[in-house]
Image: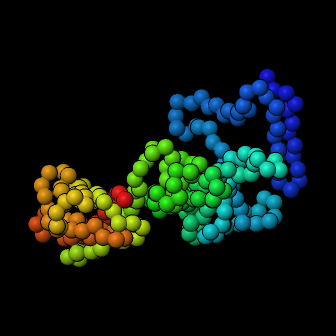
Amino acid sequence: MAYYDQVTVIEDGLLSAKVNAKSGPSIVIECFSATDAHKPQIFLAKSSSDVMDTVATTVDGELLGDIAFVGVNSGTPTAVIAAQITGVQDGSSGATVCPAALHFTVLSSGGTKVTINRADGSWEFPGSILGASIAGELIDSGTIPDARLNHSFKTGTYVGDAATTRNITGIGFNPTAVMVIPLDSKDVTMKTSGMSSTNAKNVTTGNINTDAITALITDGFTVGDGSTGTNNTASGITYSYVAQK
């Protein structure tokens, strides 16, 4: 049972709902349907116009919405944002699309704001920079607390260009292991820092290749044309990769 329930609508756009309850207040949206066409949804909609009911194209870098988790500090008691999920437009709007990224932000115990950005199909966990004092589950430039994830990973894609060798860079660290997955259903290969020379293992067949993934380098890895095994630079083929720090 709730006590002193209060809902306030303020003209400047703030809708405030306050609940004094013995148990935590909840918002529940239930949907009963046997099809995916009918489902509960919450929309945070942004139009790039100050005029009510005017629909205007949003632009690259525009903030589309926030979900904030708020606590109270221990000084002069003040509500502060402790964690936040922000939708940010990530590129120009097209005829039928609006590209976006999700930014997950948390505060460390020292008040340092750290963010992990989700865009272009890539999760980044740089890891082990700010230490275990980070008060969050999924963060950038910090660690996952309680050793829940003690390594960092980066995923991405590249398109083959028929080069004999090619450096794939921009992952932000010197990987200890890389797996390359071609999207044309050919063999998957993997290389770790413990493998000698240019060796990589064909995960599909178990064979060792010497020109599939030939090196793990400062900011990425080197792939080859597979003249003695798996071709990781075939022209026009899209390759996905997972790199571990």
Residue 118 appears in view: no
Q: Is residue 228 left or right of residue 157?
A: left
Q: Residue at x 85, y 27 (%)?
A: 3
Quadrant of the drawing holding the N terminus: top right
Q: Is residue 147 above or below residue 190?
A: above
Residue 126, percent across and down? 46, 60
The residue nearer to you, when weighing 205 against 134, is 134
Kindly identify the residue that appears in the image at 20 percent across and 76 percent down: 164
Residue 233 seen anywhere in this rendered image of the structure: yes
Locate the C terminus by quadrant.
bottom left
Residue 115 screen position, x and y as percent = 57, 59
Q: Is residue 182 left or right of residue 211?
A: right
Q: Quadrant of residue 230?
A: bottom left
Q: Is residue 169 left or right of residue 116?
A: left
Front position in the image: 216 or 56 = 216
> 115 left or right of 156?
right
In this orientation, which residue lies closer to the viewer: 42 or 210? Answer: 210
Query: What count of labels does the image hold?
Result: 0
Q: Position of residue 28 (x, y in %)?
A: 68, 32
Hey, which quadrant is residue 175 in on the image? bottom left
For image coordinates 55% across by 39% down, the residue present is 37
Residue 26 place in picture, x, y as percent: 71, 33
